[in-house]
Each structure stands twice: as structure tokens, then as C-alpha cells.
Amino acid sequence: MHQKRQNNPKLNSRLLGDRLRRLRKKRGLSLNEASKMTGVAVSTLSKIENNKMSPTFDVVTRIMSGLEISPAFLFGDSGETTTKRTPTVDRRDKPVFLSIPGADYAILCADSVSKAIFPTIVTLQSAEHHDLVGHTGEEFLIILDGTLEVLFQDETPIKLSKGECLYFDSHTPHSIRSSGSSPVRFLAVSSKSGFDDARGSDNQSISSVQKLRDLILR
């Protein structure tokens, strides 16, 4: 049985813009300085702050990384903005959830700033494979409920059931799907560097929407 979810926040562009502007001014940063730190264009940052655009997830991850902001600060009701690297305890009293069609995921230890790894609990409904995608980093998966099929380029698909796990090099183009009669729920731990270098099996950069679906929601 899946855990009942409460307070399921999604990407709120107005909340993001207000928090980004407040944080930038608190740190005494100009838009130009914030742009250099994040790699996001000044015009894009300005539109986000003024709630004139809803950013793609790869833009959000660049902002988090460049300004050292925790996911909880952007997506949740609270969150640390300090750059101190202190232990993070997650008792799931204020869980941070994000959703896209076909999949939901809970960001774990969302108060942690500048994480080198990105742990999530994924609930995947999709029974179809997406395009094979490879990227930098490494990944670890362990199945909590249901059955997951992982497809690698030029390899026989691997099926994983509850309690089974998989570790692999993310450079190898891969795809996943739920292969049972119900959604599959699993823990996914991936290198955050994978957000910045997503490529399809034809070695072409994939779209921002695919980055969200194919890299975050393994």
C-alpha cells in the first residue's frame, strides 16, 4: 500500500520568483552577478523574479546549484539558504513532492544544500519506455513496491522486483518503465551532475522537459 501523501506542492513559479528575488537581494547580488553564478541569462532571471515565466527544471537546478539553495527553499514551505554543509535529518513531517504526468517523486533531505547526490522516492505509473538517455554520473535503484524494467542500449532488459536493487554507470543510454499491473515505487539515488549533461542515444542534447522526466524520474 502506498503511503498517503499530504501537502503535495508542485513547482509554483510565483513562489519561486518571490523567493529568488528576496534571496538575491539579501545576499547583495545584482542580476548580472546571479547570472554568472548560475549560468542562467539575466533576462531569464528577471522574468522569473517578476513572475513572467515558469522556468524549466534544468533552469531551476542551475539556480539551486549556483546559488547553493536547498530544494525545500524553492519547493516547500520552508528551507535553509545557508551554504553550511551540515547533516540533514528528514523525518518526512514536511515532505517535498513534485509531479509530472506518469510519475511522482518525493525529494529526500530537501533541506540539504549543494548535494552531490540526489535521492528521491519515485512512483512510476508509465508502462512504456521513453527514448534511451545517457548522462554523466552514476545511479542506484532499489525497488520498494511493484516491478521495474530497466532497458539499456544493446542489452537484454533487466526486471527488478521488491527488495532488488541495481547500480550502473549513467553514461550508458537507459530507460525505465513499470512492468507490473500497478505503479512501481522505488528509491533512486543519482549524481546531481546528471542534470547538466543529458544526452539521447544519438548523442544529441535532449529537451528540458525530457530532462525532468528522464533524469529525475528514473
Image (tube, rainbow, N blue to C red):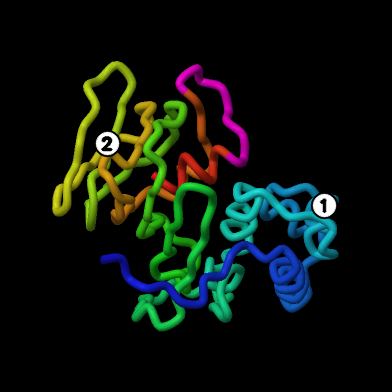
Q: Residue at x 49, y 75 (%)?
A: 84
Disc 2 designates what residue? 149
In the picture of the structure, the residue carrying the numbered disc 1 is 42
Residue at image position (74%, 59%) is 34
Q: Amino acid at mark 2?
A: Glu
52 to the left or right of 40 = right
User: How far apart are labels 2 and 1 at the CA level?
Assistant: 42 Å
Q: Position of residue 17 (x, y in %)?
A: 75, 67
> In the rendered structure, are the residues bearing label 2 and label 1 in contact, judged by CB atoms less than 8 Å apart?
no
Residue 42 or residue 6, whichever sits in front: 6
Q: Quadrant of residue 31?
A: bottom right
Give the vertical position of 167 relative to 105 (above or below): above
Q: Is residue 36 magenta?
A: no
Q: Which residue appears farthest toward the front when viewing the image? A: 181
Q: Which amino acid type is marked by label 1?
A: Val
At numbered mark 1, what does the secondary structure look like: helix, strand or loop? helix
Quadrant of the rendered structure where residue 68 is?
bottom right
The location of residue 10, given as percent across then percent down, is 59, 64
What residue is rendered at 46% in x and 69% in y? Answer: 110
